Image (tube, rainbow, N blue to C red):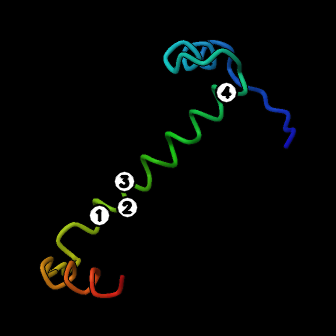
Amino acid sequence: MRTTMDLPKDLLEEAKRICGAKTKTSTVILSLQKLIDAKKIERLRSLRGRLDLDIDLKRLRKDRTATY
């Protein structure tokens, strides 16, 4: 998708250098992906202590092998 943006040159150049990207497009794509990943991790961390993961691994493994 083509989009026109007015980005600060120094900010884009620094991001490009840090990412090791060769193009402006790849810099923006990498930056957006890192932002998305960071927000997903942040959301998962906010659930810490709220989920009950009382899982019986032996039973799960047994059930899994029984279906094959």
Residue at image point 78% right, 27% down: 6
Quadrant in which the N terminus appears: top right
Looking at the rendered image, the disc whose residue lies closer to the viewer, 4 or 2, is: 4
Residue type, mark 1 in image: Ser
For the residues bearing labels 4 and 2, Cβ distance under 8 angstroms:
no
Using the image, tell me which numbered label, if any, was put on residue 46.
Answer: 1
Using the image, tell me which numbered label, if any, was put on residue 32.
Answer: none
The secondary structure type at the circle numbered 4 is helix
Image-quadrant location for residue 15? top right
In the picture as drawn, the residue positioned furthest to the front comes out as 68
Quadrant in which the C terminus appears: bottom left
Q: Is residue 67 left or right of residue 14?
A: left
Residue at image point 27% right, 80% down: 65
Residue type, mark 2 in image: Arg
For the residues bearing labels 2 and 3, Cβ distance under 8 angstroms:
yes
For the residues bearing labels 1 and 2, Cβ distance under 8 angstroms:
yes
Instruction: Determine the CA span between mark 1 and mark 3.
Output: 9 Å
The secondary structure type at the circle numbered 3 is helix
First in sequence, mark 4 or 1: give its number: 4
The residue at which mark 3 appears reads as: 41
